[in-house]
Amino acid sequence: MIDIDSGKELVNKVKNILKKNYDFEIITSGYKSELTRFAESYIHQNVAETNLSLTVKVIYEDRIGSVQMNSLDESTISKNIEKAIEIAKIAPKLDYHYRLVTPQSYSIKSKYSEKTANFTPLNRAQLVKQLIKEVNHRGYEAAGAFRTEESTFLVANSEGVFAFDRGTKADFNCVITRDNSTAHTSFIDSDINNFDIDKIIDVLLETALKNVEQIEIEPGMYTVILSPEAVAEILNYTGYTAFNGKLIMEGKSFVCHNQDKNIFPENITVADDPLDRFTMPIPFDLVGYPRRKIYLVKDGVVKDGVYDYLTALKYNKKCTGNTLSPEYASFGALPFNLVMEEGENSVEEMISCTKKGIYISRLHYVNILNPMSIQLTGMTRDGTFLIEDGKIGRAIKNMRFNTSVIDMLKGVDMISTERQTKEGFVGPTVAPYLRTNNFTFSSKTSF
Amino acid sequence: MKEILKNILDWLEPKVNYADLRFVQTEEENIEVEDGILSSYNVLTNRGVGMRVLADGAWGFAASNNLDKISLLKTAAKALDIARASALSKKEDIKLAPEDKHIDTYTTPIIKDPFQVSPAEKIDLLAKSTKVMLKDKVKKSEGSLSFYKTHKIFMSTEGSEVEQTIFESGGGIVAYAIGEGDFQKRSYPSSFGGDYATRGYEFIEEMNLLENAPRVAEEANQLLTALPAPIGTMDIVLGGSQLALQVHESCGHPVELDRVLGKEISYAGGSFLTLDKLNNFTYGSPEVTIVADATVPGGLGTFGYDDEGVPASKTYLVKRGKFVGYLTSREDAFKLGLTSNGAARAQSWNRIPLVRMTNINLLPGNLELDELIGDIKEGLYLDYNKSWSIDDKRINFQFGTEIAWEIKNGKLGRIYKNAVYQGITPEFWRSCDGISSEKYWHIWGVPNCGKGQPSQTMHVAHGTSPARFRKVKVGASK
């Protein structure tokens, strides 16, 4: 781990090695992460890790060399920086001028909880034990993972940027099983105080007890209600493939030909928003650019993507604070805090208004079939149900979907007021329940 | 480092049922070039120690990058604390399958150390290869090279002491033809980063990236104006690169014994190859024989010992269509009364070993490629993966490929874009009625196999030669 004082010391160390001959950027990432994993109703993996890494990017006349190390003694840092200088000197020039980010002010902070940071293996094991005991009592086995972690980030450069942040995270996921009856739930928050094991057990058992004697239905287009877990998964892949500014600039995103077009219903608003009250904000990106709210889709209108610093320089765009670490430089950018705005319906209303449809609890192995139409594929799992005459009815066997997110969002007619925080590709994703009249299942499986 | 590890083992020994320590140091170089211009050159060094202890019959693991002796002793104490916490919810004491004590060293045989090749030479190769692809509608090209040198020391309370140095090299190029509202990509030698092997820079030289670049670009150009693949049920041939992923997803993962036992069920899922099916299930046609072979020279999943100190081995998974074996760790093998076949692998010092693929190879048949294609009246030849998805028991799969060629009256014809095929794993492998010969066999390195929580990325490989499958559902993404 690193704090502000040791961070300043490190910056000076790098400064002294490079003198004034080279510009530089540094990223220091430190973390203490612990994870308790359980399956077949016992703890089968239980791990802890501490690490501290330093990335130094040396910039020399629009040439860049980058090194990363996790040994921070003076000689290792010097040796690695020498390597970065060697690369920067022989690298061909970029086809744009690389100027460093200038000092910024940061109004957002990560959320930090002492209790999360100090949560012990015994604390986690006790909660897991309680869960196992209660689901075993109902004839179910439990499997899942429970992580608590503390992390620090420092981004600095030779222009005087110095951005320091620390945060905590607790995440949990669990599947309970009894023959073909399964259920899943997940939790993610910066504060372990918000973790309610009794609520988690209730949610798991409620779904699992309904998810029995699954019937087979034929593939086709259906009205579906997607849980926040499923919506978050779809948003994550959409952010990845459609709203990466680099792909937009290269003509490889659906946004290229749809910018400023009113494609979706007015109730669809999706943003990268570190200020959303349900998210765990990331205050700056990995060149120290401050984060702010960026609309991707606003009131149904396609806006723009998110831009990393290099893409922004290359294409004369504004960086949106979405720069990834140097090893992902050629990827472009990802939304860090994806959020979908809430709607006006309760989940109960959404179900009761559905004469015939399908409720999807969770998606599995989602992947991109066609990036230009954002056609995704994947499977349902851990609780897929028919909705009949306004009620959750019989459980159905898992199905494969091949569906375009564009078509799916066009068909959205109800969005819940309730939103939940789920796992994202960088920070978490905040998603509501959605009802869409346009969701295509292409095949089925045997369970 | 060995001396410090030895001291820590001595400290742990009276307190545990078993312990192993792994020191891992990796040097890594990643070079990426776009449109002839270097976009990133990253050099990474990473080292640390991971300590796994079995105490009170339960597992604990702690890892740290801080290598001074006091910190490492604290890490060992942490691992012990964690094991005791795990014991709170144990069902029974964890037991390990017996394993001999091994004191040995292993180094990947290489001809040309990739870290001794100048950065300029590597950049130049990618710059030229990506530049030459920028033709007609190919508006974007990418090339990448990656090199790893991993030094590992494994020591256990059973007295094993194994030191290994593994070299890995890999890379590839991609051409993107971009039109109005559509783009098509073609990769070489394989998609998603190219091809990888436990070999030196000679592996990169043998790829002939620059020589293949114009052809790859031309195929991308053709794809942009090609028709979408037809929809229907037809006979197909899978090229070696796509077949590697087919083996990976529909055989490699379901034979991981930890998945079968439910240890991955909350995340990656389980497996349809349940214990009752071992030696009692027709996985594929008699043409299909699949082995896990960590000893085959050059495979990306080749090593001397796994991360539990078990020697690399060759194991039959599917023999002439019958399902006959799992990939195992010492813990999981014990449950079946077996010894481990050396498939417990950890991404690095900061992760525990999990049951992972090594080189999962579909053994070659005896057909010429012409014969394979020649026996199809109307079908498709599909290759180079573009999209993949499979259900959580590894039954219903769907794959998309970069390119498909029409097969008509036994001959290859025009190309199609956006091809997708879908199937049910055992039905699909039972429909395999021909595999091409050793002449076409190649071990494809897959450097991005994900599994576990916290997540681990493993380097694995699949030996394949093109194979024929009958009556497969095909279509096109929209």
Image (spheres, coloured by chain):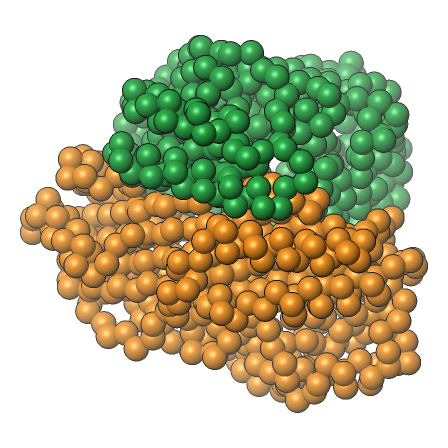
Chain colours: A orange, B green
Q: How many numbered callouts?
A: 0
Viewer-proximal residue among A391 and B288: A391
Name the residue: 26% across, 63% down.
A164
Q: Position of residue A30 (x, y in %)?
A: 32, 52
The quarter of the picture where residue A377 lies is bottom right
Residue A168 appears at what percent x and percent y?
41, 62
Image quarter in which the N terminus of chain B is found: top left
Residue at the image point whose x is 15% and y is 35% from the top:
A75
Q: Is residue B272 visible?
A: yes
Q: Is residue B358 left or right of residue B18?
A: right
Q: Residue furthest bottom?
A: A344
**Vertical side of A351 occupied by B461: above or below:** above
Q: Nearer the viewer, residue A412 or B418?
A: A412
Query: Seen in the image, is B7 located left or right of residue A281?
Result: left
Task: Assign the C terminus of chain B to one quadrant of the image.
Answer: bottom right
Q: Position of residue B146 (x, y in %)?
A: 41, 34
Q: Residue at x 45, y 67 (%)?
A: A190
**Corner quadrant of residue B37:** top left
Give the quarter of the image for residue B326.
top right
Q: Nearer the viewer, residue A276 or A270?
A: A276
Q: Is residue A152 above or below residue B6?
A: below
Residue A380 can be seen in this image: no
Q: Position of residue A74 (x, y in %)?
A: 15, 39
Q: Is residue A81 above or below residue B197?
A: below
Q: Residue at x 40, y 17 (%)?
A: B163
- Which residue is more in the foreground, A3 or A122? A122
